[in-house]
Image (cartoon, grey):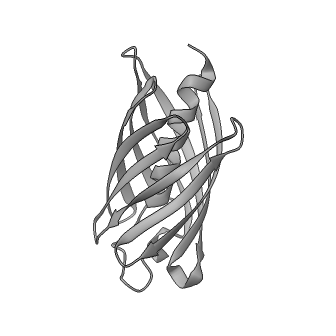
Amino acid sequence: MPARSTTTPIITALVAGAFVAGAMPASADAPFSALVGSWSGSGQVRLENGKSEGIKCKAYYTSKDGGQGLSLAFRCASASNKIDMRATLASSGNAVSGSWEERTFNAAGNVTGKVDATSINLSIDGGGLTGSMSVSFGGNNQSVLISTEGSAFKGLRISLQRG
């Protein structure tokens, strides 16, 4: 299987995950303030052929627009792929929307969804796939679960910690 066919969907999923990495519940005034800083962690990528692969990630988040926006840089590596992403996200009430790009494979797309005090639910579109993501967070940890259709990438489970 070519690296591009599995990497582009992984990128979509990881960017979406990076959007929602959280340490504390989001406030209505600045829903992304708890996200600012450095994060790192690891997880598993699930592929169409039933194989799984470990992945390690580092993420860097910067607040924009008084906490209503977020910029991020996300770098990940697995046994067969390296990923270099950039993204922006904006909130309006509990609605979230944004765009992402992966620079190594020249892929891009959109993310939309909803945020509340302990979770975020998103729809992912771009890079030749559609998908959904559920994120739960609290303290200095978060858990991201992603499912996709339209590619060899079928899912992602990742845990990130602040620092």
Placement of 73 over or under 80, stated as above or below: below
Location of residue 119 in the rendering, given as x and y in whole percent from the top left corner: 29, 62
* Residue 44 placement: quadrant: top left
Placement of 89 over or under 41, stated as above or below: below
* Residue 82 placement: quadrant: top right
Residue 79 visible (yes or no): no
Residue at the spot x=38%, y=41% of the render? Answer: 131
- Judging depth in this view, the residue of 137 and 84 nearest the camera is 84
Question: Is residue 85 found left or right of 154 in the rendered image?
Answer: right
Residue 148 visible (yes or no): yes
Location of residue 125 in the rendering, given as x and y in whole percent from the top left corner: 47, 46
Residue at the spot x=48%, y=68% of the render? Answer: 35
Q: Quadrant location of the N terminus?
A: top right
Q: How many marks?
A: 0
Residue at the spot x=28%, y=72% of the render? Answer: 117
Residue at the spot x=49%, y=58% of the render? Answer: 19
Location of residue 118 in the rendering, given as x and y in whole percent from the top left corner: 28, 66
Placement of 64 over or under 122, stated as above or below: below
